[in-house]
Amino acid sequence: MVKRNEYIIANLELEKLIKQLDLGKDVDDKLILVSNIIEKYEETNYLMDMLS
């Protein structure tokens, strides 16, 4: 299970990776890993976050 702090860190890393991607850098592998963390967290915690 992905913890909230891992999710927050993954979102910050995603922002950095998008900027690097815009500069033409190859970040596909890291982007996939970060996206998987975000997706797993959102699948299990989306409703709980909306209610809190």
Image (cartoon, rainbow, N blue to C red):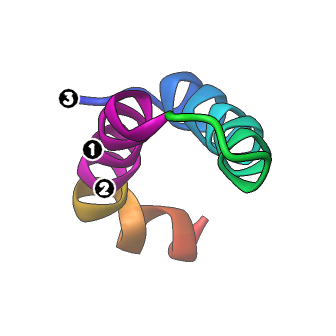
22 horizontally vs 47: left or right = right
Q: Residue 1: give its label.
A: 3
Q: Position of residue 22 (x, y in %)?
A: 75, 55
Q: CA distance from mark 3 to mark 1?
A: 12 Å
- Does the CB distance between marks 2 and 1 fall below 8 Å? yes
Q: Position of residue 32 (x, y in %)?
A: 31, 42
Residue drawn at x 32%, y 30% as measured from the top left: 29
Residue 31 within the segment the image draws in magenta: yes
Q: Residue 13: give its label.
A: none
Q: Quadrant of the N terminus?
A: top left
Main SS category, magenta section: helix
26 or 1: which is nearer to us? 26
Reading the image, the residue beneath label 1 is 36
Q: Tell me which label, 3 or 2, sits earlier in the chain.
A: 3
Q: Quadrant of the C terminus?
A: bottom right
Q: Relative to residue 39, is residue 31 depicted above or below?
A: above
28 or 41: which is nearer to us? 28
Residue 45 within the segment the image draws in magenta: no
Q: Relative to residue 21, is residue 16 depicted above or below?
A: above
Question: The disc labelled 3 sits on which kind of residue?
Answer: Met
Q: What's drawn in magenta, residue-wise?
A: 27-41
Which mark is nearer the camera, 3 or 2? 2
Disc 2 crowd, CA 10 A, few/some/many (<14, 14-19, 20+)? some
Reading the image, the residue beneath label 2 is 39
Q: Relative to residue 20, is residue 41 depicted above or below?
A: below
Quarter location, residue 37: top left
48 or 18: which is nearer to us? 18
Q: Secondary structure at mark 1?
A: helix
